[in-house]
Image: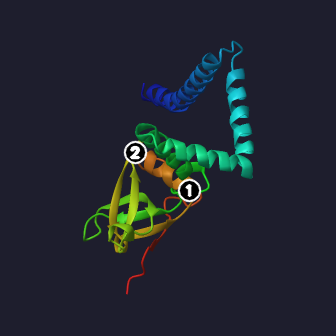
Amino acid sequence: MKRLLRYFLQGLVITVPLLLTAFVCVQAFQKVDSWLGISIPGVGFVVTLASITLVGFFGSSVLTKTVIVEFERLLERLPFVRLVYTSTKDLLNAFVGEKRRFDKPVLVSLTPDGAIKGLGFITQESMASLGDAESVVVYFPQSYAFAGWTFVVPATRVSRVEMESSDFMAFVVSGGVTGFPGTGTHAAVSPLIPQN
């Protein structure tokens, strides 16, 4: 009986992620197809990807960049629209744009004795603009959620983690369940500011 239960649980571990991934992909395809009014499954999704790629191609030209800058200036005059547009743009840029922010994984001592630590990403190297040049801004993603906390902490409490940002994010978002690929369970940690 225990062996059957073990097989069942192993089957769950294999099938549930596959089914959930397939379900999310099918729902995304169907939603995009319905928005575009296309009845052939998946064609709307392909058309959307091609359209976004074309926009990116045209958006990289000098003439188009000028038009985009002027359009963004116009949006900045509209209070609510500006909030939605700039926050969405900044978030996308932080992950995939030229100004990536989540590329500096760190380990932060949350208590004076260093017994409790947090895993996060430095998003600002200095808070000098707010009169606190000795602190950095660290974003802490939540496990199993698309949310997180942002803390301003003394730079002396922050240590860089030498590993790929994507692997680090996967580790944090999975609540520590996902291991560090290629490094076993250990990653090199070095202080942000060398200690004297």
**What residue did someone put label 2 on?**
143
Badge 1 crowding class, 10 Å Cα cut-off, few under 14, some 14 to 19, many 20 or more, is some
Question: Looking at the figure, which quarter contains the N terminus?
Answer: top left
Quadrant in which residue 78 is drawn: top left
Quarter occupied by residue 118: bottom left
**Residue 192 x %, y %:** 44, 73
| Numbered tag placed on residue 133 in the rendering | none
Residue to which mark 1 is pinned = 100
**Residue at the limit of the structure toward the left, as seen here:** 112
The image quarter in which residue 36 lies: top right
* Point 60% across, 19% down: residue: 35
Point out residue 3 in the picture as x, y percentages from the top left corner.
47, 29
Which dot, 1 or 2, sits closer to the camera? 1
Instruction: Say which residue appears at 46% left-offset and 43% top-offset.
Output: 77
Secondary structure of the residue carrying tag 1 is loop
Q: How many marks?
A: 2
Residue 147, percent from left and from top: 40, 43
**Can I make out residue 152 in this image?**
yes
Residue type highlighted by circle 1:
Arg
- Considering only vertical position in the picture, is 163 above or below 30? below
Render colour scheme: rainbow
- Looking at the image, which residue sits at the far bottom? 196
Find residue 174 and report its horizontal and vertical position in percent. 45, 45
Is residue 27 toward the left or the right of residue 129 in the image? Answer: right
149 and 38: which is toward the camera: 38
Name the outermost residue toward the top: 39
Q: Secondary structure at mark 2?
A: loop
Q: Is residue 180 visible?
A: no
Q: Amino acid at mark 2?
A: Ser
The C terminus, quarter of image: bottom left
**Upstream in the sequence, badge 1 or badge 2?**
1
Q: Is residue 88 left or right of residue 69?
A: left
